[in-house]
Image (tube, rainbow, N blue to C red):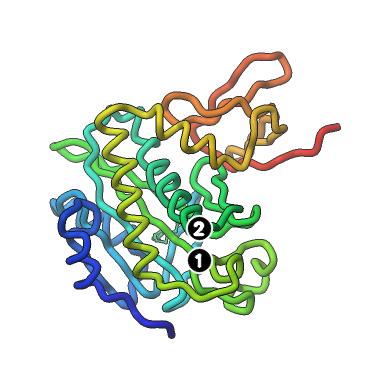
Amino acid sequence: MMAPFEPLLLQRERSEGRFGRRIRYLPRIDSTNDRALALMEAGEPEGTLVLAEEQTRGRGRRGRSWHSPAGLSIYASLILRPSLPSEQLPLVSLTAAVGSARVLLSHSLLRVSLKWPNDILLGGKKVGGLLSEARGDGRGTGVVVGLGLNVNHEEKDFPKELQGRITSVLLESGRLWDRQHLLSEILIRWEQEYEKLLSVGPRDLLEGFECFSEFKDGSRLRIDQGGESVCGHYAGLGPRGELLLRTADDSVQSFSFGDVGRVSEG
Ligand code: BTN
């Protein structure tokens, strides 16, 4: 195993900021999102980060599992209490996506892109994902945003069925990475995007997402919403981070969830 995280050091580094100023570190846990949701419901303040070396029941979007071997990745879930109307909550996970992409780009990983809503890609292959879960209580709505980022995986560290389809920062760059340093940088950029969203609104965030977007205006896409799928041309993101598709009758439809992929023209 690579060097483990040093949560006290990370916490000290982040003491001036909000994200990660308190860290709950667990070498092994079922899911950092589940633990963060329980803590949030018990009143934990905004900015607490649940961090693990390994997950035994890591969860992905739409009921999928998230392969979570020990010591290679970042598995981290942040507790947030955004003062935003509920329809704007999907924007919160975009702050994590854009913040993470900016960090990878700052390390000259030029092939970084984002696939709506929550996938981080390197060279067109998935390197990370975000799972955002909201819960309301008497005092408002809290959100847990979980980040899974494949950092130091070699091809053999992925399950057979995923080999060749997903990637890691190591595979893209050819070198090992300090996970703690990468996480610290991600927390800083993520916090900046979040503060900006709350103080001046979503414009910069949406522009940032567009810059990194895997899809460009006009790309022909199919969105699958569990049983139902719709084809159309990518028309950007709406003001709440929803996906816009121009469909055959030239109307623009907006989607708040789903799996998106390219379809060939024809
Ligand atoms: C996806 O792409 O489907 C989202 C994957 C999110 C995985 C992370 S790992 C840390 C956190 N804890 C979980 O159980 N899931 C998220």
Badge 1 vs badge 2, beta-carbon distance below 8 Å? yes
Question: Residue 205: x percent and y percent?
Answer: 41, 34
Vertical side of 73 occupied by 192: above or below: above
Real-space CA distance between mark 1 and mark 2, rounded to the nearest whole angstrom: 6 Å
Q: Quadrant of ligand 1?
A: bottom left
Relative image position of residue 141 (x, y in whole percent)? 23, 38
Q: Residue at x 42, y 78 (%)?
A: 71
Dot 2 amino acid type = Gly
Q: Residue at x 67, y 42 (%)?
A: 261
Q: Is residue 52 left or right of residue 17?
A: right
Q: Quadrant of residue 262?
A: top right
- The residue under label 2 is 128
Cβ of mark 2 under 8 Å from ligand 1: the answer is: yes
Mark 1 is surrounded, within 10 Å at the Cα level, by few (under 14), some (14 to 19) or many (20 or more) other residues, namely many
Residue 30 point in image, percent of width and height:
36, 69
Residue 170 image-quadrant placement:
bottom right
**Quadrant of the image for the C terminus?**
top right
